[in-house]
Image: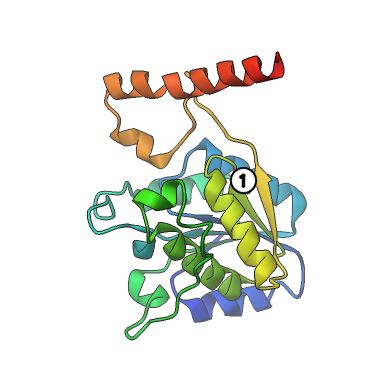
Amino acid sequence: MKIVNLIKDVKEEIRTYSGESIGFVPTMGYLHEGHLSLIRQSKKENRHTVVSIFVNPTQFGPAEDYDKYPRDIKRDERLMKELDVDLIFYPNTEEMYPKGFCTYVDVVRMGSVLCGQSRPTHFKGVTTVVIKLFNIIEPDIAYFGQKDAQQLIILKKMVEDLNLKVLIKAMPIVRDEDGLALSSRNSYLSKAEREAACFLPTALKKMQEQIRGG
């Protein structure tokens, strides 16, 4: 397993793959079983698996949790070594957004509804960093969890509209024993908040059952 911090080093390493299939899992780190399930799927379907770890500042609003977002690179490295990941791309902010950076990708309309209403710059930050990562790594397949449903739809639209060669593969939501979808931000929750959050999957499941029952 190699860990690189610079874009030029990623490209140099990718060239050694000689056209063999590349699976890519973009993350912001603090990995959990949801991330690991994406990595395992990539390992099954590709000759090489690349994982990025980058807490992307452009998808955070001014009053959001960029500074306190959970980070533990040593733990992440250990987990990925156990899964035999080929390459970890772990850049800093200056590497991804050098001085003078001013180009963004925005999937209009789709990014301004639902979550986008309260986070108006969020999806523009997501699409911009993801297309940069696609251009750096040039994967054949990129893996995303269905938990972030709106993000997944927007990224698929970006790939379609911009004629990108990468295939975006949606993978099932991975849940904890209590039904809560796994998320790095779950570490913020108090015991009472977690109990309250578990009503969401329970309510959705009941709604699903009622719809199917007519």
Q: Quadrant of the C terminus?
A: top right
In screen coordinates, is 133 left or right of 44?
left
Q: Residues within 10 Å of mark 1 (few under 14, many from 20)?
A: many
Give the answer, above or below, for where 88 lies relative to 165: above
Residue 128: percent from left, percent from top:
48, 69
In screen coordinates, is 119 left or right of 109?
left
Give the residue at x 36% y 81%: 98
Q: Does residue 28 show up?
A: yes
In screen coordinates, is 102 left or right of 149?
left
Label 1 SS: helix
Name the residue that disc number 1 marks: 38
Number of callouts: 1
Give the answer, above or below, for where 181 lies relative to 11: above
User: What amino acid type should be assigned to the residue bearing mark 1?
Assistant: Leu
Give the answer, above or below, for where 9 lies relative to 47: below
Q: Does residue 29 show up?
A: no
Residue 157: percent from left, percent from top:
64, 61
Q: Please name whichever residue, 167 or 52, is drawn nearer the observer in this view of the structure.
A: 167
Q: Quadrant of residue 61?
A: bottom left
Give the residue at x 64% y 73%: 14
- Name, please, the residue furthest toward the bottom: 100
Residue 209: percent from left, percent from top:
64, 16
Colouring method of the image? rainbow
Q: Please name whichever residue, 173 or 104, is drawn nearer the observer in this view of the structure.
A: 104
Give the residue at x 45% y 56%: 112
Residue 118: percent from left, percent from top:
35, 49
Give the residue at x 33% y 49%: 71
Q: Quadrant of the N terminus?
A: bottom right
